[in-house]
Image (cartoon, grey):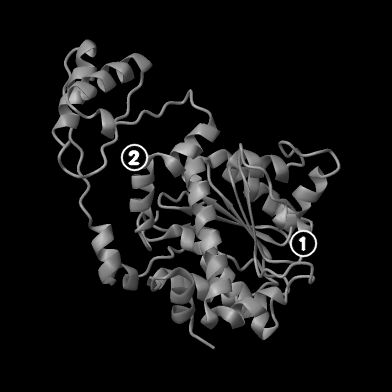
Amino acid sequence: MLSFSELFFELTGHPPFPWQARLFSEFANADLRKDDFRKSCDVPTGLGKTSVIAIWLLALAHRAGRGDHQGFPRRLIYVVNRRTVVDQATREAEGLRKALTTKPGLEPLAASLRSLGSGFSETALAISTLRGEFADNAEWRSDPAQPAIIVGTVDMIGSRVLFAGYGCGFKSKPLHAGLLGQNSLLVHDEAHLEPAFQRLVETIESEQRNHREFRPVRVMQLTATARPSGSVESILSDADRAHPEALKRLRAKKAIEFVDVGDRNTVSQKIVECALRYKDSGNAILLFLRELKQLEEVCNALKKNGLEGRLQRLTGTMRGFEREAMLKDNPIFARASKQRSKDTNDKD
């Protein structure tokens, strides 16, 4: 059997940071009869927070292989309030499943995961996305015993755990609440942005424990700006802070320059001037404007400077379907997407 580092590399394509190995060890050796799960995972931006998904999957397969998986969360629910991160986490989960089916070295891992299901599905892992404008493919609820990753927004997951799922019929609402609220690990990414939701899921977890429910939900906040309710030991260690790649990312310089526009009426002009400074840099340039009038002024000015073919507008008035189509087919947005896919362990 391969080691965690070897399996992690096979599964994700990059070696683990020390904190990732530590979290795997915690998952793999947790005493499931106790409240022995980490409540907060404080990972700085750039150190691969979404790899929690892969770590949970490896721990589940590890425990299944040695026969002590009973009570270990069978479903991982990844919740975040930003749709772009939901889509990113979904792609990462799909990449894990693809690796399980295509890499021979991961076949024992896939076999362990398949052994947990009821035999209705040949796949080792179910993946579903719950967010607005995405239809639920129902994979996560077709076989309650099958390992599953459910990625969703706060409103879609929150409504379901409260027996009020958006778009669900009255007969299916208890099913959704039961599967999400039992035998699952709920990972709340960017938890500092949604403190009310964090308190909600922590309250649900606490009530289940008070009533000694059989396999309650386990909640872990995942954030670079943790606000734990109690004293929680940091997941990072001195080994992480001394790790060459982690050190490079933690010390990466990020600069911001403020430009005085003087008068409100000159905002568009100043933005155009700033943009033109970087037109030959070869990098993507993002311009954020608050008013549609300003958008028109900036676009017209940039077109006059010969940038018409390199310019694409994106506004909140566009439908989600149109935005998704642009991401796939528009050469400007497709370029950004391809650049993003080059990243490995720094997706966060």
Task: Look at 60% across and 79% down and name the residue there.
Answer: 109
| Residue appearing at x 18%, y 19% in the figure | 261
Q: Residue at x 52, y 82 (%)?
A: 105
Q: Position of residue 281 (x, y in %)?
A: 16, 43
- The residue type indicated by label 1 comes to Pro
Mark 2 and mark 1 residues within 8 Å of each other at the beta carbon = no
Question: Which residue type carries mark 2?
Answer: Ile
**55 is higher (above) or lower (below) than 160:** below
Q: In this rendering, is residue 49 above or below 239?
A: above
Question: Residue 119 in the image: x percent, y percent?
Answer: 79, 72
Mark 2 residue crowding within 10 angstroms, few (<14) / some (14–19) / many (20+): some
Location of the N terminus (image quadrant)? bottom right
- In the image, residue 276 above or below residue 244: above
Do we see residue 232 in this rendering? no
Q: Nearer the viewer, residue 250 or 122?
A: 122
**Which of the two labelled residues, at mark 2 and mark 1, occupies the earlier sequence position?**
1
Mark carried by residue 307? none
Q: Position of residue 66 (x, y in %)?
A: 66, 85
Name the residue tied to disc 1.
144
User: What residue would you read off at disc 2?
Assistant: 332
The answer to which quarter of the image holds residue 162 is top right
Determine the CA span between mark 2 and mark 1.
42 Å
Tag 1: Cα neighbours inside 10 Å, few (<14), some, or many (≥20)?
some
Could you tell me residue 283's position as x and y percent? 23, 44
Q: Relative to residue 285, is residue 94 depicted above or below?
A: below
